[in-house]
Amino acid sequence: MRIEELEAVCREAARELVAREDRPLPPAAVLPLSQATKVTTFPDFPVADPERYDLLAAFARDVLRPADAPAFGFVAEGAADSEDGPIDVVVVVYGARNHHLAVTAAPFTDDGLGEFTPAEELDHAAFPFLAPLRHAVDVARPPGAATAPPG
């Protein structure tokens, strides 16, 4: 999967989440796997970064690593500044093995979501709780790689 395809999959997952979930939108992990795209919501997502980190570390250990997921997305509701003041947005962060994380956002509208902003590289200090997901995709085996013997 190319990074542009990953972005499209994550944007579509965000649109589907907005269509089916009540607000505030629960944060969600998007895993584009070879069999299907898996979206996992976190309705009780912690407020503090250390607890968020721990939750996502467990998710990475239990879900990403066993699936050898080479990419992920993260969708969450947030706020952004606009010319008319603060607006509610959906933020999408995505990354793949050996690619820097990228971020895009779209405003909530009466019809769901507006247009996404052009993606840009995510600042290294932003979203520190996503580090376990990033690490899990960086160490995933490439497709077709042999499974290492236990030990």
Image (tube, helix red, strand yellow):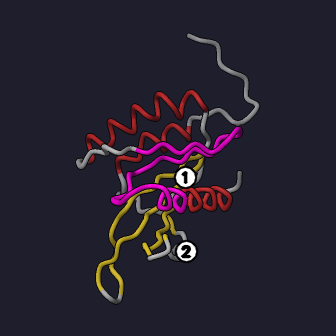
What percent of the width, then of the height, locates residue 53? 33, 41
Around disc 2, counting alpha carbons within 10 Å, would you say few (fewer than 14), some (14 to 19), or many (20 or more)?
Answer: few
Please report the residue visible at 33 percent of the width from the left and 59 percent of the height from the top.
Answer: 24
Dot 1 falls on a residue whose secondary structure is: strand
Extreme-right residue of the structure: 144
From mark 1 to mark 2, how far is it between C-alphas?
Answer: 15 Å
- Above-or-below relation of 38 to 74: above
Magenta includes 23?
yes
Q: Is residue 145 left or right of residue 61?
A: right
- In-front residue for pair 44/126: 44
Extreme-bottom residue of the structure: 83
Q: Is residue 52 left or right of residue 71?
A: left
Q: Is residue 65 left or right of residue 55?
A: right
Q: Which residue is mark 2?
A: 118
Please report the residue visible at 36 percent of the width from the left and 54 percent of the height from the top.
Answer: 127
Instruction: Tell me which numbered mark, 1 or 2, is placed earlier along the sequence.
Output: 1
What percent of the width, then of the height, locates residue 76? 40, 57
Amino acid type for the residue under numbered disc 2: Pro
Please report the residue visible at 43 percent of the width from the left and 39 percent of the height from the top.
Answer: 132
Span highlighted in magenta in the image: 14-41
Q: Quadrant of residue 35?
A: top right
Amino acid type for the residue under numbered disc 1: Gly
Please report the residue visible at 59 percent of the width from the left and 11 percent of the height from the top.
Answer: 150
What percent of the width, then of the height, locates residue 117? 51, 75
Dot 2 falls on a residue whose secondary structure is: loop
